[in-house]
Amino acid sequence: MEEHAVLAEPDDPVVSEVNVYVTQALTRHLYVLQYPNRPACYSRDQQELLKARIKPVQNKVELEMSLPMDGSNYSNSKGESIVRRIECGVTCSNYERGVMDRQVLTSKPVDMATSRYAIAVLKDGELHLVPLQRTLQLRPDFSYLDKAVMGDQKLAKEREGVDTEEEEEEARPVQVQIARVKSERAEAARKASYHYQQQLLRDEEWVQLDCIGLEEHRADVERGHLFCSCDDQPMDVQELSHTHFLNSMCPIDDPTAEQVSLKEQVRNILINAVVMTFDQLCMLLSNNKSSDQILQCLAAMATLVQCCWVVKSEVLYKDGTSSDFNGISCDLLRSARDHMLFRFTESRVVTRCEISSVVNLPKEEMLQMMEGVSTWQQGKGWQFKLEYDEQFASQYPSIVKQQSDQWKLLHCKSTASARVLTDNSVVSQASDHTTSNHVAMVTNDDASGNDVANQNIPLIGQDLVVMVKKLVDRSVIKLSALKHSLQLLHYEVDDVHLMEALQEAGITEIDCKWLAAEKEKTRLFTRQLMGDHLDKYRPILLDLLRERFTLTYKEVASKIQERLSEKAPREVILKALKDLCTHKNSKWIINGLK
């Protein structure tokens, strides 16, 4: 009996009981990062998170952190030397200050069963659990040393080529191989091989992430997802009226609503709702807001589809962002979504094939776009979520007419942009080879046979200035090639506006004396200054190129030393030459002649 009494009274009695809740809001996006070991006197607060990116399939994360340069263990001369070596081996360097001022931490998966772990938060006597997606261990990335070695090797080859610049290149035999037609079994075996699977992992594109400070409002919103909304009573949505449903989603008696501007309130509601009628939006906003004020905000944040307001693509897809699935750029997402919305302005029901024939987006991104504004109807297609708002059409016919005209112009622009695909942006490199090497046109036409996609769009003002800057970039371009590139992008520009845009963009004509006979046919343009450390060398190079179209390294170096009374570093001269010329047969030939 005494032994039974001891067992009945344990040494750790229950002090209190708490309810345990599990939320799945962040299950797929919650990672635990293990940072490298550091001295106890060194705080992570001294480092600023500059950039972050992820490969979702591999669950691989890279963080770009600022490197403290004021410490006793940092060598400025070594940091500058490494950056100079890296810049010789790559075309684009991330070290804008010319010194190694950042460090990259890359993740390695931890060999542990992460599914058994969760993040726990105790709040108000309740324990909230969020399952972990993955635990990652961060380690310093030293790939910059490989780039520095590549830069040394490339510089040595160029030095060897310049020393023998008077010698002609020897003819070399070219080996041609004809690939055999592989059977389906051989192709399946190749795709199942370890090498092929590793290649797929290497080819996965990085998805850029937003870096949010701990004290920002958005960080508070994300931390709120750690808690399960267990206090909400279950409700039958089908038995609620439209008014009560909207009020339950966005309460109008929120005390913080008055502290937010009307424009911000409209923006937040539209991003969450995506599509809604004008009456629904007015009910969600404060009662003291007039219809004219709301319409003024809607003009900047939304567009009219079936007389219902849909959030604009540029509001939904911010600059510099990309899709979660395949990392598609925001520019292409905006163009594709605008074309989809234009289809819904013409018909309440569209099919995915009609849109895919023009925008050529992956299936995941396309379905995500269509699910935001429409619902799938078996045997019909994708039907717009809301009915045509007859009341708004009768009250504001001028706005409906204005939005209709804007859609016609916007459709031309979005279709043209959606048809042009490039590596990183609208134009990834400006040269006379732009049309053949960097621009790929989608060959499949619109199923409905729309001719509006082939119409040219007038381009003037700042839009034209930005476009010519992208086309010219750091190189030299012929005026006829510049006009041809604009035509390929379906832009209509007259000569007067084009010359004004070139002047405003700081792009000047190179007055080449050796082009006296064909000056009207071959007009070359470039930017005199780029706002970097090469600006003091570019004018000297351009003066030499005005006299003749071919240069040698020796005469360029001699001219720079004569003008500046100082000897410029070899890698700097070569970098300036590569911007304006092409190296061929031991000579540097000005770009834009072909």
Image (spheres, rainbow, N blue to C red):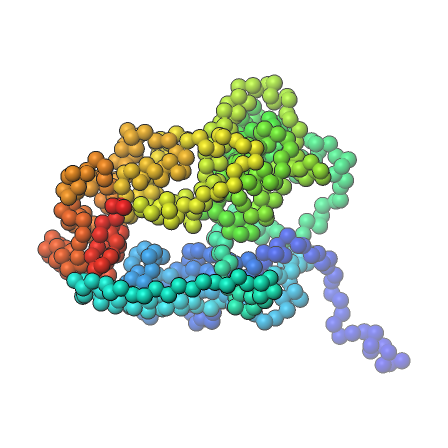
Side (left or right) of 493 relative to 115 = left
Q: Give residue 503's position: percent from left, percent from top.
A: 25, 35
Furthest-right residue in view?
1
Q: Give residue 436's position: percent from left, percent from top.
A: 37, 47
Side (left or right) of 62 relative to 365 = left
Q: State the quadrant of the N terminus.
A: bottom right
Number of dots carrying numbers: 0
Determine the residue positioned at 13% across, 57% down.
555
Note whether residue 71 is visible. Answer: no
**Up-down: is 344 above or below 7?**
above
**Up-down: is 337 above or below 182?**
above
| Front residue (pair 225, 156) | 156
Residue 148, quarter of picture:
bottom left
Determine the residue positioned at 51% across, 51% down.
327
| Front residue (pair 295, 528) | 528
**Up-down: is 219 above or below 185?**
above
Determine the residue positioned at 49% across, 30% down.
451
Note whether residue 306 is visible. Answer: yes
Q: Give residue 488's position: percent from left, percent from top.
A: 39, 38
Q: Give residue 251's position: percent from left, percent from top.
A: 64, 36
Determine the residue positioned at 65% across, 60% down.
131
Side (left or right) of 145 relative to 453 = left
| Front residue (pair 101, 388) | 388
| Front residue (pair 294, 571) | 571
